[in-house]
Amino acid sequence: MDIPVYLVAGFLDSGKTSFINGILEDGFAREDKTLLICCEEGDEEYEKKALDNVTVVTVDDEDELTLAFCKELEKKHHPKQVLIEYNGMWQMEKLYREVLPANWVLYQIMTFVQAPTFELFVKNMGQLMMEKITNADMLVFNRCTPELKEALRARNLRMVNRRADIYLEVEGKRVAVVQSYTTRATRTSREIEAFGENEPVATIAGANKYTLELSRLYATDEAISDGINFYDLNDFSLVICKPDKRIIYSQCRWSSIEEAGKLGDLVIWDAPDLDYICYRFGSNLAKKVIKRGRVM
């Protein structure tokens, strides 16, 4: 079973713990058993009253946070979701590639930055700082003055943040976005036998065959209006866009589809776009909240 992972990144005193306390007090873990992995302890502590249904595990050393360690935590605590307060001095690339189990699906990366010290960190620890910005789904600058806002705009951080796009395409039209994928490649071969020989005299390599497993597909608005039926989908392409390359798996066809449904939670925002919410951090922009299918 997939376990959603919410990663809260940033350097010490950037506001990570305050943010976690806020979402826990708002009921983030009220219905789903949550594992909170704390990789950095600052001056602020977690609010004990908000830790109902939450198991807190502290990791002091980066070498302790391994794939085997995460699997053991899952086996011991059986979490429905995982929240990680990540150490600002640790590389995030290692977490993605070596630490998180395959069924721990990275849902969202939230990066917090203390605006007055941003330039100092970029100058002295540029790679560590920029990787957190590059991979962030939500980027929050705290303690930001009007002068700092202008300086940050001049840096054009939107161009730095380029998350990979993964989507399905049919006849050049994007029909669905994909949250994550795994690929397994196999190659067939054919042996050449000769008269009078006991062993094959040659082996001819065949074409590569790719088996793709896609997690969580969301139909685009255009595909929905066209009445797309994923069960009828055939001869489609999986397109993976990365900052440095573009990968296309063409002539795909599905072999199995799993679908699960439950009463959904929904927030309708009083905002023109998602970016507006980030710029109004701390303001209540929620126009309507639907919890487990009921309007609150």
Image (cartoon, helix red, strand yellow):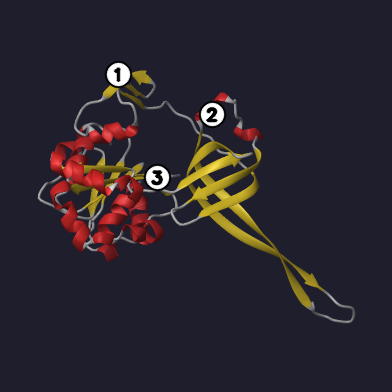
Expressed as whole percent of the image width and height from the top left, the position of residue 8 reads 27, 47
The residue mark sitting in front, 3 or 2, is 2
Residue shown at the point (54%, 27%) measured from the top left = 224
Expressed as whole percent of the image width and height from the top left, the position of residue 165 reads 46, 45
Task: Label 1: state its secondary structure.
Answer: loop
Q: For the residue marked with disc 2, what is the amino acid?
A: Glu
The answer to whether residue 224 is above or below residue 81 is above
Q: Earlier in the sequence, mark 3 or mark 2?
A: 3
Q: What is the number of the mark on residue 3? A: 3
Q: Earlier in the sequence, mark 1 or mark 3?
A: 3
Image quarter in which the C terminus is found:
top left
Q: For the residue marked with disc 1, what is the amino acid?
A: Met
Q: CA distance from mark 2 to mark 1?
A: 30 Å
Binning the other alpha carbons within 10 Å of mark 2 as few (below 14), some (14 to 19) or many (20 upward) gives few
The residue labelled by disc 1 is 296
The quarter holding residue 257 reads top right
Task: Label 3: state its secondary structure.
Answer: strand
The residue labelled by disc 2 is 222
Q: Is residue 144 visible?
A: no
Q: For the residue marked with disc 3, what is the amino acid?
A: Ile
The residue mark sitting in front, 2 or 1, is 2
Q: Earlier in the sequence, mark 2 or mark 1?
A: 2
The quarter holding residue 59 reads bottom left
Residue shown at the point (41%, 54%) measured from the top left = 101
76 or 247: nearer the viewer: 247
The answer to whether residue 292 is above or below residue 138 is above
The answer to whether residue 68 is above or below residue 196 is above
Expressed as whole percent of the image width and height from the top left, the position of residue 206 reads 72, 64
Image quarter in which the N terminus is found:
top left
